[in-house]
Image (tube, coloured by chain):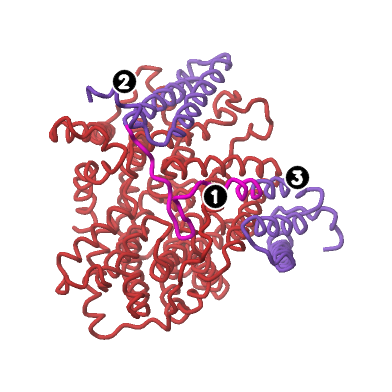
C-alpha cells in the first residue's frame, strides 16, 4: 500500500469509472443544493423537516464517490454484466444504442398525436431494424399486430390508459 | 390452526372457474415470458404488470401469483437449454443442467427442475403459512424506531452483502434513495428535486423506475454488445424421470428447500447464496461425485429447489414487514402499492382475505406450473429461438406501454429512457441493480419512520434507539460493516484490492450464516 503514490496510476484499469464517480459527486451536490433551497424547515410537529434526509443522502453520495474513486485508483473494476445474448470483449456498439434511443424518443413524441397503434408499431419496427432485422415488412407487420392486439386487449378490454390518437373513432 | 382455516377460506375464494382460468393464464404467460432469453423473473413481473391493471384487486393478485411462479420457473428452462444464463440465481442450475442437456439428458434435467420446483414451492408456501403470521404478531408490536432500524438492515444488507463490491453497492443504494426523494414532501408539501416540473411533483412511480432499470436498461445494454450469431439451443422432448433419477433427486429437493427458504426470508439473502450452497452440498454428499461437472442430476435438483424455496421465503418479509429481499419482491411491492395495498404488519389484520387469497393462489399457481411444464417443455424450448431483434424490440415495446399506462403521461416515457441509460451505466460499471430498487422503494418509508421516531421523542436523538429489536439491528449492521476489516486484518496487509475483485465470496459468509441459523430455527421447531 505504501507504493500506491507512485505506481497506482499505472494500475488504474477502466478509466471511464472516474466519470461515474464524478457523476455521483455531481448528483450529491445537486441534492444538497436543492435542499438548501427549501425554506421553513422544521416545526415542533416535525423536528426533522424535509431538508434533513437530502443533506444526509447528498453527503453520503459525496463520500461514496470519493471512496469509489479511491477504489478505482487502487485498481478496482466493476464486472460488466454478462448474459445469454451478450458478447463482451469488443467495444460497445453505440450506433445501435443510438438508434434504439431514437426509436424510443420518437415513440414518446408520437404516442399522443398519432396514437399507440401507430407509434407502437413504429417503435417495434425501428427497434428491430436497429438490432439487425432486415425483413422490413415483416418487422412492421409484427409491430402493427402487437400494437393492435395490445390496444384492443388493454385499452378497450381492460380499460388501461393508451391513446387512440388520430385513429380515434376508427379503432 | 386458525391460519389453516383462514387459508382454506382463501382457497374457497380462489377456486371459481374464472379465477382458476386467471391463475392458469398468469402461469402460462409468466413462464412464456420468463423463458425468453435475457428476461429474468424481475423483468417478467415488471413487464407483465399492465396485464393486471384493469382487473379487480383480488383477481390482480391471483394473476400476479401465477406470473411470479411462472417467471421463476421459466428462467431455469433457459439456463438448462441455453447455457450462459442472464440472471444470477440460475447460474448454478446451468453448471450441471446444461451439461446434462448436452449429453442428451435435457428431458431429465427439465423434469427434475420442474418437479423439484413444485416440491420446494409447495413446502415453501406451507412454511409461509406457518411463519408469516408469527412474524406479523411480532412486527405489530414494533414502533417507528424499530422499523427504521430494520429498514437500515435491509439497506446495508442489499448494498454490502450482495455483489462483489461494497462501494458499488452503496452507490447504487444512494442513487435509489435519491430517486425516491424526488417529488413532494409528504409532511410539509415542499417540492424536492423536482426542478419546477409538475410531472416530477407527484413522485417518480416505482414501476417506472423498475421497468426503466430492468427492461430498458437491459435492452440498451444488450444492443451495445449483441452476440451476432445466435447461441445454440438444445432440442428437448417431453420431460420424464426414471426410477433411478427419482431416487437421486428427492433428497436434493428437500435439502435445497431447507437451504433456500431461510435465505429468501432474510434481507440480502437472495437466491445466489443458497443455490450455490446447495450445489456444494450435493457435490459433497453425492454417491456419484465423478459425474459433477459432466451433468449430475443432483446438481440441478438441489439448486432448483433452493431457488424456488427462496422465492417462497421472500414472501415472509414482504407480507409481514413490507420489506423486499430480492428484485422480484421489490417489484411485487411496487405492484401492491399500485393496487392500493400497503404491505406491512397491518396488512394481515386489515385485509386478511387478500393475504390468504394470495397465498392460496401461490399454491394453485405452483400446481399449474407442474401440470403445464411437463407437457409444454418442447414449446418453451422453441421460444428460445426467437430472433433477437424481435425479442428486444418487443421488450422496448412492452416497457413503454407499461410505463405509459401507469399514469397516462408521455413524460414518463422520457423518464423511462433516462432511467434506461442509468441502468445501462450500472451494467457497464458493474453496479448491482437491486440496491437501487430497494432504495427507491424503502427510501420514502425510511424517511417517514425517521421523522415519526424523532417526532415522538420531541427531536431528541435518543428516540432513534428504541427497544432491543433496534439495538439488535444496529448490532447486525455494525457486524456487516466491520467484518471485512476484521477479516482483512487477520489476513495481514495483503488484501487491499479484494474489495473490487472477488472479496464478496468469503467476507459476507460470517454474518450471513449466523443469521440463517437464526431464522431457520423458527420454521423448524
Is residue B304 at least partly visible in the picture? Answer: yes
Residue B357: image location, x then y, percent: 46, 62
Element at badge 3? Answer: helix
* Labels 3, 1: front one: 1
Which of the chains bears the disc numbered 3? A
Q: Residue at x 42, y 83 (%)?
A: B238
Viewer-proximal residue, A63 or B120?
A63
Which of the chains bears the disc numbered 1? B
Q: Residue at x 57, y 41 (%)?
A: B419
Viewer-proximal residue, B347 or B237?
B237
Q: Is residue B457 magenta?
A: no
Boundaries of the magenta span: A75-100
Q: Which mark is residue A109?
A: 3
B241 relative to B165, above or below: below
Q: Is residue A96 magenta?
A: yes
Q: Are marks 3 and 1 in contact (CB under 8 Å)?
A: no
Q: Which mark is residue B224?
A: 1
Q: Which mark is residue B462?
A: 2
Q: Which chain is red?
A: B
Q: Which mark is residue A85?
A: none
**Quadrant in which the N terminus of chain B is drawn:** bottom left
Along the horizontal axis of the image, is B21 left or right of B304?
A: right
Amino acid at each position: 500500500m505504501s507504493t500506491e503514490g507512485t505506481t497506482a496510476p499505472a494500475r488504474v484499469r477502466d478509466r471511464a469509472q472516474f466519470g461515474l464517480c464524478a457523476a455521483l459527486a455531481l448528483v450529491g451536490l445537486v441534492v444538497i443544493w436543492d435542499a438548501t433551497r427549501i425554506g421553513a424547515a422544521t416545526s415542533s410537529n416535525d423536528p426533522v423537516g424535509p431538508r434533513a434526509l437530502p443533506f444526509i443522502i447528498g453527503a453520503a453520495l459525496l463520500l461514496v464517490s470519493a471512496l469509489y474513486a479511491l477504489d478505482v485508483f487502487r485498481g478496482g473494476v466493476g464486472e460488466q454484466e454478462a448474459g445469454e445474448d451478450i458478447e463482451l470483449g469488443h467495444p460497445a456498439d453505440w450506433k445501435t444504442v443510438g438508434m434504439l434511443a431514437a426509436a424510443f424518443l420518437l415513440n414518446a413524441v408520437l404516442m399522443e398525436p398519432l396514437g399507440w397503434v401507430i407509434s407502437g408499431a413504429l417503435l417495434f419496427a425501428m427497434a428491430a431494424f436497429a438490432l439487425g432485422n432486415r425483413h422490413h415488412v415483416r418487422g412492421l407487420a409484427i409491430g402493427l399486430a402487437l400494437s393492435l392486439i395490445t390496444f384492443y386487449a388493454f385499452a378497450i378490454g381492460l380499460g388501461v390508459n393508451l391513446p387512440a390518437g388520430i385513429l380515434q373513432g376508427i379503432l | 390452526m386458525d391460519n389453516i382455516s383462514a387459508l382454506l377460506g382463501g382457497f374457497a375464494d380462489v377456486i371459481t372457474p374464472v379465477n382458476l382460468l386467471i391463475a392458469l393464464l398468469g402461469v402460462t404467460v409468466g413462464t412464456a415470458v420468463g423463458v425468453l432469453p435475457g428476461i429474468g423473473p424481475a423483468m417478467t413481473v415488471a413487464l407483465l404488470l399492465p396485464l393486471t391493471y384493469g382487473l379487480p384487486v383480488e383477481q390482480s393478485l391471483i394473476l400476479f401469483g401465477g406470473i411470479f411462479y411462472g417467471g421463476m420457473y421459466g428462467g431455469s428452462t433457459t439456463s438448462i437449454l441455453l447455457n450462459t444464463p442472464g440472471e444470477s440465481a440460475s447460474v448454478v442450475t446451468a453448471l450441471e443442467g446444461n451439461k446434462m442437456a448436452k449429453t442428451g439428458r435435457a428431458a431429465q434435467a427439465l423434469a427434475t427442475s420442474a418437479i423439484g420446483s413444485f416440491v420446494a414451492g409447495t413446502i415453501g408456501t406451507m412454511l409461509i403459512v406457518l411463519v408469516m403470521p408469527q412474524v406479523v404478531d411480532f412486527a405489530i408490536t414494533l414502533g417507528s424506531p424499530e422499523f427504521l432500524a430494520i429498514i437500515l438492515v435491509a439497506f446495508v444488507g442489499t448494498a454490502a452483502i450482495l455483489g462483489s463490491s461494497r462501494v458499488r453497492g452503496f452507490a447504487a443504494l444512494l442513487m435509489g434513495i435519491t430517486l425516491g426523494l424526488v417529488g413532494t414532501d409528504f409532511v410539509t408539501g415542499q417540492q424536492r428535486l423536482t426542478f419546477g416540473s409538475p410531472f416530477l411533483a407527484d413522485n417518480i412511480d416505482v414501476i417506472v423506475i423498475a421497468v426503466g432499470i430492468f427492461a430498458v436498461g437491459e435492452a440498451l445494454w444488450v444492443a451495445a454488445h449483441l452476440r451476432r450469431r445466435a447461441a445454440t439451443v438444445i432440442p428437448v422432448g417431453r420431460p420424464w424421470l426414471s426410477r433411478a433419477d427419482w431416487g437421486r433427486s428427492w433428497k436434493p429437493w428437500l435439502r435445497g428447500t431447507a437451504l433456500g427458504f431461510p435465505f429468501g426470508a432474510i434481507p440480502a439473502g437472495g437466491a445466489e447464496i443458497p443455490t450455490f450452497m446447495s450445489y456444494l452440498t450435493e457435490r459433497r454428499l453425492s454417491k456419484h461425485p465423478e459425474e459433477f461437472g459432466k451433468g449430475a442430476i443432483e446438481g440441478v435438483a438441489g439448486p432448483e429447489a433452493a431457488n424456488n424455496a427462496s422465492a417462497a421465503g421472500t414472501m415472509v418479509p414482504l407480507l409481514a414487514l413490507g420489506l423486499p429481499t430480492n428484485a422480484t419482491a421489490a417489484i411485487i411491492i411496487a405492484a401492491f402499492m399500485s393496487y392500493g395495498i400497503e404491505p406491512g404488519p397491518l396488512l394481515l389484520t386489515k385485509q386478511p382475505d387478500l393475504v390468504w387469497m394470495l397465498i392460496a393462489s401461490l399454491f394453485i399457481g405452483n400446481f399449474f406450473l407442474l401440470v403445464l411444464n411437463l407437457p409444454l417443455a418442447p414449446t418453451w424450448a422453441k421460444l428460445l429461438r426467437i430472433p433477437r431483434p424481435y425479442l428486444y424490440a418487443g421488450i422496448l415495446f412492452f416497457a413503454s406501454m407499461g410505463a405509459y399506462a401507469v399514469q397516462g403521461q408521455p413524460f414518463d416515457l422520457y423518464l423511462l429512457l433516462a432511467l434506461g441509460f442509468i441502468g445501462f451505466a450500472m451494467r457497464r460499471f458493474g453496479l448491482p441493480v437491486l440496491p437501487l430498487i430497494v432504495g427507491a422503494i424503502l427510501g420514502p418509508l425510511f424517511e417517514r419512520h425517521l421523522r415519526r421516531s424523532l417526532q415522538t421523542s420531541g427531536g431528541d436523538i435518543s428516540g432513534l434507539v428504541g427497544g432491543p429489536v433496534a439495538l439488535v439491528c444496529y448490532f447486525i449492521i455494525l457486524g456487516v460493516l466491520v467484518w471485512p476489516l476484521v477479516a482483512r486484518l487477520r489476513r495481514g496487509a495483503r488484501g487491499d484490492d479484494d474489495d473490487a475483485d472477488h472479496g464478496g465470496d468469503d467476507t459476507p459468509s460470517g454474518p450471513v450464516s449466523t443469521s440463517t441459523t437464526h431464522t431457520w430455527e423458527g420454521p423448524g421447531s
